Image (cartoon, grey):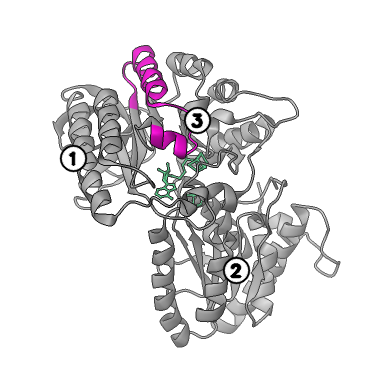
Amino acid sequence: MLNELDLDQINLCMEPPGEEPARQYYFMAKCREWVKDFEKKNGRPPSAFIQTFGCQMNAKDSEKLTGILEAAGYRTADSEEADFVLYNTCTVRDNANQRVYGRLGVLNGLKRKNPSMKIALCGCMMQETAAIEKIKTSYRFVDLIFGTHNIYKFAELLYAALEDHGMIIDIWENTDQIVEKLPAKRKFPFKSGVNIMFGCNNFCSYCIVPYVRGRERSRSPKDIIREAEALAADGVVEIMLLGQNVNSYGKNLDEPMSFAGLLKEIEKIEGIKRIRFMTSHPKDLSDELIEVMKHSKKICRHLHLPLQSGSTKILTAMNRKYTKEQYLALAEKIRKEIPDISITTDIIVGFPGETPEDVDHTIDVVKQVEYDNAFTFIYSKRTGTPAAAMENQVPEDVVKEGFDRLLDTVQKTAKKRAAMLQGKTMEALVEEKNEQDPTLMTGRLSNNILVHFKGDDTLLGKLVTVRLEECHGFYYIGTMVEGKN
Ligand code: SAH
Ligand code: SF4
Ligand code: F3S
């Protein structure tokens, strides 16, 4: 791990080193010089605010960016009234983009009040040429823009932005590089995401992710295990392994390793008590994985298995590479082998060519699988994807009708599944104080359901046993029966 001493020993009179991560340590030290100077002039350290707009992988990137800012000496601010504001963007659906533009308008006002404020944008949306063009013309006050492939260079880019007064744009088309050993600042002391792979090779026809995150690259098992061990030593009890399709982990490694094989290694790490992962593509989910999950004491009883559509016709057009029947057979096998597992999913309504009959098939799958929860999305046209060029786009009112019907079924099955836990006593990881009622703490069950119960801050990060008393649809009110560590 990086500490202050390492940075202080760097000779800043020398040219920056060529190799990584040494080069970034050098620029962190350079930024720290700048920060010290700022402190002298202003009587306080500069503040920084990072907003994450996207998925867990985006959130993990934000933790790395925060780690670099803290190594440079910035203090974390809890609002945009800060000296440095960074938006880590998402572009998976158009509303994610619109949120960024809306917030940028507000930032412009803040920057007028504090002209020395620096504004930076990074993340998936920045990999799109159209977004960059729009920012260059309509949002001239942005100081720094970088993408998903060169995020490891953040210290170097930050230093350039601090020294420079124009708009700096550094976007790479792709990369095969994975830079290890950069700092990160966890949002929760007791749980953490761990990247196991980057990018995606699946090219589902509606999805922009492969274009903005590049090709699939797996981290070496050695690096993943080293990180998980370091996290465990630092008090982390739950880790979530992150990748767009964790089931294809390891295929491009010099010594290939399966995802199930990786899980077995991580299970051995003392101190790690819970293991989660996101996301599983149904086409690659192996019997080996089901077997490993079934016998594991640590892998949580939760599987997120995106369906996208229950109609084979639409699934084919989506390039998902499974049929309705194959998906159903897989879900049945999982439920049979691991009866206490919760299965959640993602569904898109309104993909080009989708008819009400296709939505009927999706609803049928929801009824048969009985999802514990489902995220339902209205199809969003992403420029550059094959689906965007399809002619048979669905009218808005038809989409809305299908969406409402689906949501109704999803909510009914989710409620029914949650109600089945009534009266049970289960283990929960205490994650936070309840926002509405500070006498309550919020814990997460292995199956991802939340439970609120009377308790105090001392329980944070602890595994406790809770009796589930009142089911409120998607969460429970319960009573702590015993605390343990
Ligand atoms: N890699 C993950 C998904 C990442 S994106 C997987 O394959 O499961 C998260 C979810 O966003 C997807 O599962 C999909 O349901 C949704 N999504 C992706 N592109 C979309 C689009 N163009 N319109 C609407 N929803 C979309
Ligand atoms: Fe997108 Fe499909 Fe890749 Fe998931 S698997 S990120 S939906 S292309
Ligand atoms: Fe969004 Fe990028 Fe994640 S597009 S969903 S932040 S990979």
Does residue 244 sit above or below 103 in this rendering? above
Q: Position of residue 198 (x, y in %)?
A: 60, 43
Residue range (magenta): 313-342
Residue type, numbered disc 3? Lys
- Residue wearing tag 1: 408
Does residue 414 sit above or below 8 in this rendering? above
- Residue wearing tag 3: 321
Residue nearest the viewer, comparing 131 with 106: 131
Residue type, numbered disc 2? Ile
Q: Which mark's residue is nearer the viewer, 1 or 2?
A: 1
Q: Which mark's residue is nearer the viewer, 3 or 2?
A: 3
Classify residue 367 as left or right of residue 336.
left
Q: At 40% across and 24% down in the image, what residue appears?
A: 327
> Neighbour class for label 2 at 10 Å: few (<14), some, many (≥20)?
many
Q: Position of residue 309 (x, y in %)?
A: 36, 36
Quadrant in the picture for the C terminus: top left
Q: Position of residue 380 (x, y in %)?
A: 40, 54
Q: At 37% across and 39% down in the image, what residue appears?
A: 346
The mark nearer the N terminus, 3 or 2, is: 2
Cα gap from disc 3 to disc 2, whole angstroms: 36 Å
> Neighbour class for label 3 at 10 Å: few (<14), some, many (≥20)?
some
- Residue wearing tag 2: 145
Q: Secondary structure at mark 2?
A: strand
| Most common secondary structure along the magenta stretch | helix
Cα gap from disc 3 to disc 1, whole angstroms: 27 Å
Q: At 57% across and 47% down in the image, what residue appears?
A: 210
